[in-house]
Structure formats: C-alpha cells, structure tokens
Image: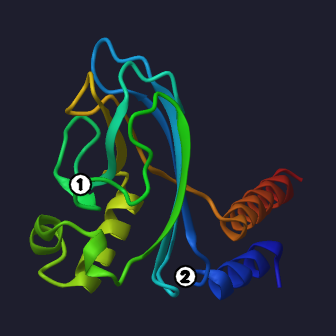
Amino acid sequence: MTALACAFAVGIGTAGAAPLTFETTLAPEVSGATGSGSATLVIDTAANSLVLAVDWTGLSGLTTVAHIHCCVAASGTVAVAVTPGTLPGFPAGVQAGIYNNTFDTENPLIYTGGFVTNFGGGTIAGAEAALLAGLLKGTAYFNIHSTLFGGGEIRGFFTAVPEPASLALLAAGLLGLLATARRRRV
C-alpha cells in the first residue's frame, strides 16, 4: 500500500469522529474601537457539545453582551444564533477578560428563536446542523459589544483548524506526488 493510500485510509477512519475546532482573531468592528482578542470554539456533534474559550483586552468601552452570529458573508452582519441576550456567565462591565464555557447543543435555550426558525428549519437538530455548516463555511462570527459600541466593538469570523489526521493526509499526498514526479524524471 502506498503512503498516500495509507494516509487516506487513516483519514477515513477518523473522519467525522473527532470534534471540530475553529478559531478567530477578534479585531475592531467599527472605526474608533480599540479592542482585540481571540476565540476558540470546539464543536462535537457526537457529544452534542460546544466549547467556547475567549480572551480579549483593550476595549474602548465596558463589555455589555457577547454572542455567536451565523450565517453571513465576512462583509455583513446577521442576527444572533447562539445565546439570546448574552452568553451565560460572560463578564459584563470590563475592558479585558477571559471566558470559558461548555454548551449543550441539544438545549433549545442556547439558540435564538429566529435562528432555529430561519436557519434550523424549526428544529434544534437543524439549528445545530446550520451552526456547524456556518462554521465550516466561515460565515459564523463571535462578537463582543461594549458601552461605547452597542452594535458591537470587536468581532472575528471563525475558521476551521485542520485536525492532525487531515494534516497527515495532506503531507502524505504531497510526498506521494513528489515521489511520482521524481520517478518520471528518472
């Protein structure tokens, strides 16, 4: 079996079983905003969980609310998808902080009614699937609002972090192509 075929077999064996990780860098959403930060989101469809870790600093105002929006192109905005109002336990009234929480993606209270209806086809399972699809397409973003920027001070669109099996598959494929090219030259 070639290295490429072995890597492909390993990739198939782990595809879909592992949680998916997404990251973003948070930057000013509007002129005059000064905050920055980062967010990591891990979604596990087998365990029906979503883990969100955020750190931020230097906001122009004090935090008021924070949430995940989905599903829109990078130049636009869209209604809130996850957590009506603000994330449970998100610190209000600070210019910098850290937030970590785990959500049950089968819990209807974590989604907005509009997201379930408009993107999830009226079901919680559909909302979870729509959120995952938005994350995979790069159309979901994390947003922190502040007292000075009520519409949102900093935000960032999530991008997928390649899982190790995908990276191994890519490396094996490149090595296979290199070996094939070398054999053709000889």
Closer to the camera, 122 or 169? 122
Q: Residue 170 in the image: state x and y as whole percent.
A: 69, 61
Q: How is the image coloured?
A: rainbow
| Left or right, 30 with reference to 45 | left
Asked which secondary structure carries label 1, the reply is loop
The amino acid type found where label 2 is placed reads Gly
- Outermost residue toward the top in this view: 32
C-beta proximity under 8 Å, tags 1 and 2: no
At a point 66% along the width and 66% down the height, the residue shown is: 166
**Mark number, residue 17:** none
Q: Quadrant of residue 5?
A: bottom right
Q: Is residue 27 above or below residue 19?
A: above
Task: Say which residue appears at 23% left-offset and 54% top-offset.
Answer: 85
Pick the residue in front: 40 or 129.
40
Q: Residues within 10 Å of mark 2 (few under 14, many from 20)?
A: few
Q: Earlier in the sequence, mark 1 or mark 2?
A: 2
How packed is label 1: few (under 14 Cα within 10 Å), some, or many (20 or more)? few
Q: Position of residue 136 (x, y in %)?
A: 41, 61
Position of 32 relative to 131 (above/below): above
- Amino acid type of the residue tagged 1 in the rendering: Gly
Q: Which residue is found at the position 72% from the left and 63% from the top?
A: 173
90 or 182: nearer the viewer: 90
Front-lying residue, 118 or 74: 118
At 82% from the left edge and 74% from the top edge, which residue is drawn? Answer: 3
Residue 85 — which label? Answer: 1
Q: Which residue is mark 2?
A: 16
Left or right: 31 as drawn, with respect to 176: left
Considering the numbered disc 2 on the image, is that residue within a helix, a strand or a loop?
loop
The vertical placement of 65 against 140, above or below, is above
Residue 163 point in image, percent of width and height: 65, 65
**Which of the image's four quarters has the N terminus?**
bottom right
